[in-house]
Image (cartoon, rainbow, N blue to C red):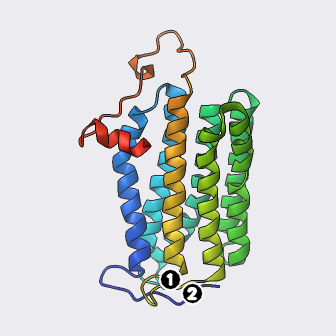
């Protein structure tokens, strides 16, 4: 079930839905270099990089999809890409946590499992896009996302409640947004802000909480011993930015 369509404006079919995610894509893209410099160790940066790539891709595709007129081939194609990016965003988030915080099976085994499920879901959802009910598709996203509870439980046991908390908080915000989308309620401003726009805001909030948590986790845990020949990139993270060091610190505050 989908709510009534919002009132379009020149250049944007779904204005608020498009604006929110295009702005989020731009913000994530601009902040990515400083967030990556804020963490230590190649593996931590790789995990964070996977998350950031998934976030920028999802927000960019979603924002672009929502600006295109309905009934066009371009919108249909971008809708499928948008939905596919949800799978990679979820898998990228879980990957970052497991790569940074765990070792052995809990790092590579769980990462392989999550990506296997994500790719399977992505292919099935894309191939049977018109056949899969809206509620079922949303439920499958949540099911994969809540695999993050495994990471939350292990994080809490190994590294403490404070480092684990953002994982749970982000998941709850995502879930709240999905329930609003599923219920097609509320509609704060008819024709402007409806359940889907609220869902978009929830996705941004969940991603921001997870970004903060992943960076905090990477900075709190010591980097793994550097291999012979590793460069200076494994040194302490640098929070400097064109806005001054305080701006970088504020992201993690």
The x and y percentages for residue 159 are: 66, 32
State the CA–CA distance, disc 2 to disc 1.
Answer: 7 Å
From this view, report whether residue 8 is shown above or below residue 228.
Answer: below
Nearer to us of marks 2 and 1 is 1
| Residue at 50% over, 26% down | 42
CB atoms of marks 2 and 1 within 8 Å: yes
- Rendered image: mark on residue 73: none
- Percent of width and height locating residue 213: 54, 44
Q: Is residue 208 left or right of residue 249?
A: right
Q: Which residue is painted at 31% across and 43% down in the image?
A: 247
The residue where tag 1 is placed is 194
In the picture, the quarter occupied by the C terminus is top left
Residue lying at 57% horizontally and 54% vertically, measured from the top left: 89
Determine which residue is flagged by label 2.
3
Q: Is residue 22 left or right of residue 47?
A: left
Who is closer to the viewer here, 9 or 210? 210
Q: How many marks?
A: 2
Badge 2: how crowded within 10 Å, few (<14), some, or many (20+)?
some
Q: Position of residue 118 (x, y in %)?
A: 68, 53
């Amino acid at each position: 079930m989908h709510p009534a369509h919002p009132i379009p404006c020149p250049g944007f079919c779904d204005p608020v839905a498009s604006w929110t995610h295009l702005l989020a894509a731009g913000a994530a893209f601009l902040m990515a270099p400083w967030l990556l410099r804020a963490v230590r160790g190649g593996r931590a940066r790789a995990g964070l990089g996977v998350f950031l790539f998934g976030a920028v891709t999802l927000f960019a595709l979603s924002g672009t999809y929502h600006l295109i007129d309905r009934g066009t081939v371009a919108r249909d194609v971008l809708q499928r890409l948008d939905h596919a990016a949800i799978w990679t965003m979820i898998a990228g988030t879980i990957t970052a946590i497991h790569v940074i915080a765990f070792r052995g099976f809990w790092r590579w085994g769980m990462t392989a499992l999550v990506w296997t499920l994500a790719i399977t879901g992505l292919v099935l959802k894309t191939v049977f896009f018109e056949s899969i009910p809206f509620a079922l598709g949303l439920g499958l996203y949540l099911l994969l996302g809540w695999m993050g509870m495994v990471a939350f439980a292990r994080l809490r046991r190994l590294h403490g409640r404070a480092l684990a908390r953002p994982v749970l908080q982000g998941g709850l915000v995502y879930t709240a947004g999905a329930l609003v989308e599923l219920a097609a309620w509320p509609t704060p401003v008819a024709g402007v802000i409806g359940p889907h726009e609220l869902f978009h805001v929830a996705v941004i909030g969940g991603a921001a909480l997870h970004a903060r948590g992943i960076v905090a986790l990477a900075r709190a845990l010591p980097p793994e011993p550097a291999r012979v020949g590793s460069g200076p990139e494994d040194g302490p993270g640098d929070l400097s930015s064109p806005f001054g060091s305080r701006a970088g610190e504020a992201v993690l505050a």
